[in-house]
Structures are given as structure tokens and as C-alpha cells.
Amino acid sequence: MATPDPTPRTTAILYQNTEKTITLLDIPTSISLAFHGTPTAPHREIYSAPPPQVPYPSTEPKSDRARANVMRIMGGSSRFPTTLLRGALDEVKWNHGGPWCLPRRIAPFSVSTSCGRGGKRKFMDEKGGDGEMEPSIQIPTDDGRWRRGETRNARALSKTHREHFPDVGAIARHLVHNPYSVPLPISIGTAVQTYSIPPQTAFYLTNIDKSSISDFSTAAQSSLSTPTASAGPGQFDFILLDPPWDNSSVKRAGRYNTIRQSQDPMLALQEPLGKHIAPGGLVACWITNKEHVRECALAAFDSWAVELVEEWAWLKTTVDGLPVTDLEGLWRKPHEILCLGRQVDFSFKSGDSTTASRREVLKRIILAAPDLHSRKPCLKELVEPLMPIPAEYRALEIFARSLTAGWWSWGNEVIKYNWDGYWHRSE
């Protein structure tokens, strides 16, 4: 691909219709802009994979028996109307005269091995030889510095010097906060791996389970003790979840750890997370195309008094605007679904618990050429117009693997893509 334009962009949106229901987005740009928080910051680009030039080879079942087996495994598909997907492709082709994605800063990966959810990659150096190995983030279960139920103090980073942590255990289960309007570096381990923390960002590096949820709640209540115009103490106007749902193809490739179908990665969050959703707050959850996954996500919504109001489809395309797989495919669909719900107050409703007056679910489509496996578009630019006060809102991403300027992030790989090896800094 062509060398990226060194001039910083101010938006990742390449096309959007008037109703904002169809958006063509550049994924690497969405991530880079979300790191800086402002397009006027020093320009950094995230390394990416080449976008697909042609659709992927078909993996569709050939026989009736095989098709029936796929339907049994899928348990029914989470369906997004194909007519809307096809219409979005046609609209962009008709109205958008530019590229379907921007030139990317390609990072050569020489080795890819299984290591946690996102895998571990070995980079080539400028001459094609072996370069740095992506550092592994392994959270110790108990190294003597922490006991279950213990509240660990929040740690604000310094603007005058680089914070160094001897190992991951020294940073895990702390709320780490960059209170400044510029990115700040931290380093971890004896090999001194450096990570860049975006402006006004907080992160909580832990596994997401019952043992860590109460500590996170305590940290949120303590650090966000002052209410805003739209959110109370410890509450967020927007919460984004990207759970490690069961995925057979991912497990075969060993790309990251998933949850077995009999398990629900949202289960531990069902009871406690509701108190962290601001009145009228927006909750978004990525799901796979299996019906049981959709049911798990909506069950969590119900436990938080969150009503489904929108569904977004990320339609993956080639550089020429073709879907990466057949729109009618059974086994490998070219889109992923994001369920969006709003926290509602049922106290004003009548005794009818069926909520017969539920609003129609709005459909929106994001078209974007895929990047590294499992790396999704950053939604910050698309979500902010939906916030009560776009310039002043609180956001939390759960199961995060990168940090977004101005947001909180929580998960066991929250700084994965903030490792400096994943970024190119323009001179």
C-alpha cells in the first residue's frame, strides 16, 4: 500500500449519510485519533495489517447434511437484515468517490503464537531480521502484595518522570490514572517495555471476575465521587463491552482464550454493573452471530434495567468495497453485531412488566476494512454525539485491550495495544 499521509486527520469517517445510519470508517485512524484525544496532538500511527484485497475463500458447507450441522452448531443465527447490508454497500458505492480505507502503516509480524486473549507477535526489524517480541501481560493470582478484599490506592502518573513498575504484579489491581492532557509513558519489567498512556485516561488491569468487581466498584466510587450533570458518583454515561465469547475458529487457531458455550462471560457482571450506569446511560456490547450469545447479552441488559434501542452491524469489506464473505453465508458472516441499550426507569410504567410500548430498534451500519484479527473499530467518534453532553461524559470499556483518551478501561489486557512496539511516531 501507499505510504500514509503524514498530515494528521481530524476524523476517521470517510463517508456518512445524513441520517448517520450508514458510516464508512477507517479502523486504524479511529484508534489513532482516540489515542490522542485531539487531532492537533503529535502524530502517532498504530501499526496495522494489510486490508483484504479480495474476499476471503469460502468456508460454506457444501452438502445439505453439512448445512444442517452448521445450523445446529449456530443454534440459530443472530440476523441483521441482508437487505440493509446490501443497501449500505450500494449507497456508499453510489455516493462516495474516495477510497474504502486509508493507506496503512504496515508492521511485519514474523511469528504469531498463542499467549492470552490476543496472542503474542514477534516483529521484524527494518532489515527483515528478528526484532522485538511483544511483551506478555500475565496477571499473578497472588504474589504476596495483594489480598482479596483489599482496596489498593489509585495511582496518578507523573508528568515530570517516567513511572517504572518492576513487573505486571506491581501495576495490576491498581487504578492507574493519567490526569494530564498529554500522553504519558510507563515502563514495566527488567526488559523495560514501554507503554504510552493516553491523556486523561484511567485503567484497571485485572481479570474480570467476582473477586475483582467489588474492588473496581470501590475504585470507581472513590475516584468519581463528584457527580456530573448526567452521572452520579461512580457512574458512567457510556459502557462498552467486548466479551471473549466462545468462537470455534479462534480456538482452533489459538489466537486468544474464549469462554466455553456453557459459560457466560457477562455473568459475573450482571448483578454489580447496573449501579455504575448513569440514569439514561448507554450500554453497548459486541456479540457473535450465535443466538445463545445474543440471549446472554440481552439477559445482562435486563439485569441492568437496560432496554435495547439500537443494533449496529460492522460490515467488513475489501479495499474495493466488496463484503469479505457472502452476505447470505451460514458459517462465516461478513459482519459483527453491536447491541446498544439505554438504562431506563421502569418506576413510571404501569404494572405490565412486558413493556408493550418498547420502541423500534434502530439499525445502523459501519462499513470498514478489517485490521489485525479481533481488532474492532474504535467507536469514540460515533458514540460521542449520542452522549448527553458530548464534551463532558464518562465512559468505561470492559474487556478492553487498548486505552482511549478520556475513558476508563478495565480488563486483563487493557494496555496490550498501548505497547510502543505497536506504534509509529512521525518525526
Image: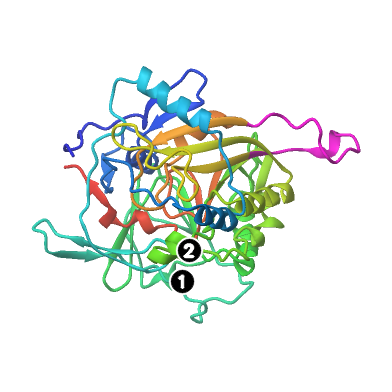
The segment highlighted magenta reads 341-361
| Residue 370 horizontal/vertical position (percent) | 36, 43
Is 276 on the left or on the right of 205, as rendered? right
Indicate the secondary structure of the residue bearing disc 1. Answer: loop
* Residue indicated by mark 2: 412
Is 423 on the left or on the right of 286, as rendered? left
Disc 1/disc 2 C-alpha distance (Å): 7 Å
* Residue indicated by mark 1: 139
Task: Name, please, the residue furthest toward the left.
Answer: 127
The reply to whether residue 219 is in sight is yes
| Residue 36 horizontal/vertical position (percent) | 35, 41
What residue do we see at 71% from left, 48% from top? Answer: 304
| Residue 167 horizontal/vertical position (percent) | 38, 72
Give amino acid for label 2.
Asn
Tell me the quarter of the picture where residue 200 sits.
top left
Give amino acid for label 1.
Ile
Task: Name, please, the residue furthest toward the right.
Answer: 351
Q: Badge 1: how crowded within 10 Å, few (<14), some, or many (20+)?
A: some
| Residue 59 horizontal/vertical position (percent) | 40, 52
Tell me the quarter of the picture where residue 261 sits.
bottom right
Relative to residue 175, is residue 183 depicted above or below? above
Q: Badge 2: how crowded within 10 Å, few (<14), some, or many (20+)?
A: many
N-term-proximal mark, 1 vs 2: 1
Q: Give the number of the disc on residue 125.
A: none
**Dots 1, 2 in contact, CB < 8 A:** yes
Label the magenta part by its dominant secondary structure.
loop
